[in-house]
Image: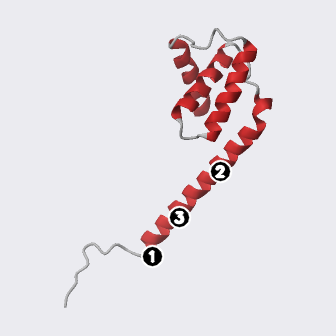
């Protein structure tokens, strides 16, 4: 339920800020959301692109409309592939750290006598 709560919270936050994109016609709103999602996928670390996409998504929600998902299937597949790759990378990094600490115990406290 956390994901649903997050989406509701983001939509409520967008509404409280004054619904910046309420003036857009439905087609324009959809076009901008497609562009924003593309920018988010192209630059996943760009918070401004992600926030724009979330605001446009929130405006869709407030209008009780679905964004034009059919227009972004390639971008969504790319995003999912990138997330999966990052998760694998993190898992391998964690495994490497665990392996290193288990096979090479810390030398702290070791006494060196000559």
Vertical comparison of 93 with 11: above or below: below
Residue 103 - label:
1
Asked where in the image residue 42 lies, by quadrant, the reply is: top right
Mark 1 and mark 2 residues within 8 Å of each other at the beta carbon:
no
> Helix, strand, or loop for circle 3?
helix
Residue at the location (71% across, 11% down)? Answer: 25
* Residue found at the far left of this picture: 114
- Whole-percent x, y for residue 106 in the image: 34, 72
Asked where in the image residue 32 lies, by quadrant, the reply is: top right
Mark in the foreground, 3 or 2: 2
Category of crowding for the residue at label 3, using alpha-carbon neighbours closer than 10 angstroms: few (below 14), some (14–19), many (at least 20): few
* Residue found at the far right of this picture: 70
> Helix, strand, or loop for circle 1?
helix
Category of crowding for the residue at label 2, using alpha-carbon neighbours closer than 10 angstroms: few (below 14), some (14–19), many (at least 20): few
Calculate the distance from the C-alpha at mark 3 to the C-alpha at mark 2. 16 Å
Please give the residue where the numbered disc 2 appears in the rendered image: 84
Depth order, front residue of 31/92: 31
Calculate the distance from the C-alpha at mark 1 to the C-alpha at mark 2. 28 Å
> Helix, strand, or loop for circle 2?
helix
* Residue found at the far top of this picture: 23
Quadrant where the N terminus sits is: top right
Depth order, front residue of 102/64: 64
Vertical comparison of 3 with 14: above or below: below
Please give the residue where the numbered disc 3 appears in the rendered image: 95
């Amino acid at each position: 339920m956390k994901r649903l709560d997050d989406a509701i919270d983001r939509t409520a936050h967008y509404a409280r800020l004054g619904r910046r994109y309420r003036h857009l016609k439905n087609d324009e709103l959809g076009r901008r959301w497609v562009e924003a999602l593309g920018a988010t996928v192209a630059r996943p670390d760009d918070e401004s692109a992600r926030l724009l996409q979330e605001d446009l998504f929130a405006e869709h929600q407030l209008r009780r409309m679905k964004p034009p998902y059919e227009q972004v299937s390639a971008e969504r597949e790319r995003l999912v592939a990138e997330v999966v790759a990052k998760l694998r990378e993190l898992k391998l990094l964690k495994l490497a750290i665990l392996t290193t600490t288990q096979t090479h115990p810390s030398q702290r406290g070791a006494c060196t006598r000559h």
